[in-house]
């Protein structure tokens, strides 16, 4: 060392600029780490919410399936001669062929059958015939439509059931 102290400035330590640069780099890493943890927590929360909804949907499907199985009709998918009040959901081949192919595409079909008292069936049949006649011949008056409905109603047999497919 010389006597004027020129060698003292080279002693160990960091300058203020070096400390500011290191603190900036560390702050950048800290921000990235916080963002990474936050994204992970958000994904975890979304996954938990999705799983809760999937669990609720599975329970709902199970309950609906049990209720529909309780109302199921014939296993063949064909109506019996006498229909009972019922609701069916069946997987049937498209087009409802008499003998479906082994790998035929199947669709879910909703069917319903109810007993109709004769007066209610006659009323529904009159309404249906009136609409059909009104569409076929729109220029007829109400009295003429009623006469045609009465004439066609005499030819239509009452079935005692109502069906929906």
Image (cartoon, rainbow, N blue to C red):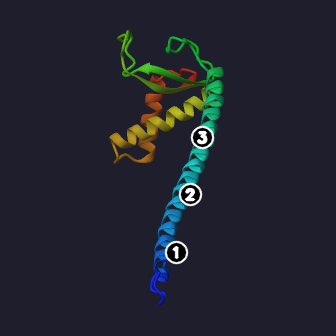
**In the visual, does 69 lie left or right of 14?**
right
* Badge 2: residue crowd in 10 Å (few <14, some 14–19, many ≥20): few
Q: Nearer the viewer, mark 1 or mark 2?
A: 1
Q: Residue at x 47, y 21 (%)?
A: 91
Q: Which residue is mark 1?
A: 13
Q: Earlier in the sequence, mark 1 or mark 2?
A: 1
Give the quarter of the image for residue 112.
top right
Q: Is residue 9 visible?
A: yes
Give the quarter of the image for residue 54.
top right
Q: Nearer the viewer, mark 2 or mark 3?
A: 2
Q: Nearer the viewer, residue 9 or 18?
A: 9
Label 3 – label 1 distance at C-alpha: 56 Å
Q: Nearer the viewer, mark 3 or mark 1?
A: 1
Q: Nearer the viewer, residue 77 or 145?
A: 77
Q: Which residue is mark 3?
A: 51
Label 2 – label 3 distance at C-alpha: 20 Å
Image position, residue 78 (x, y; %):
49, 14
Give the quarter of the image for residue 101.
top left
**Residue 38 numbered tag:** 2
């Amino acid at each position: 060392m010389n006597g004027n102290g020129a060698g003292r400035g080279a002693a160990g330590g960091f300058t203020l600029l070096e400390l500011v640069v290191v603190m900036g780099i560390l702050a950048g890493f800290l921000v990235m780490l916080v963002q990474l943890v936050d994204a992970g927590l958000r994904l975890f929360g979304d996954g938990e919410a999705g799983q809760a909804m999937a669990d609720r949907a599975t329970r709902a499907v199970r309950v609906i399936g049990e209720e529909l199985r309780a109302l199921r009709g014939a296993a063949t998918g064909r109506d019996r001669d006498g229909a009972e009040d019922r609701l069916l959901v069946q997987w049937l081949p498209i087009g409802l062929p008499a003998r479906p192919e082994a790998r035929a595409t199947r669709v879910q079909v909703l069917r319903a059958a109810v007993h109709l008292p004769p007066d209610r069936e006659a009323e529904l049949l009159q309404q249906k015939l009136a609409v059909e006649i009104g569409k076929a011949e729109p220029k007829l008056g109400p009295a003429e439509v009623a006469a045609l409905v009465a004439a066609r109603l005499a030819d239509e047999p009452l079935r005692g059931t109502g069906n929906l497919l």
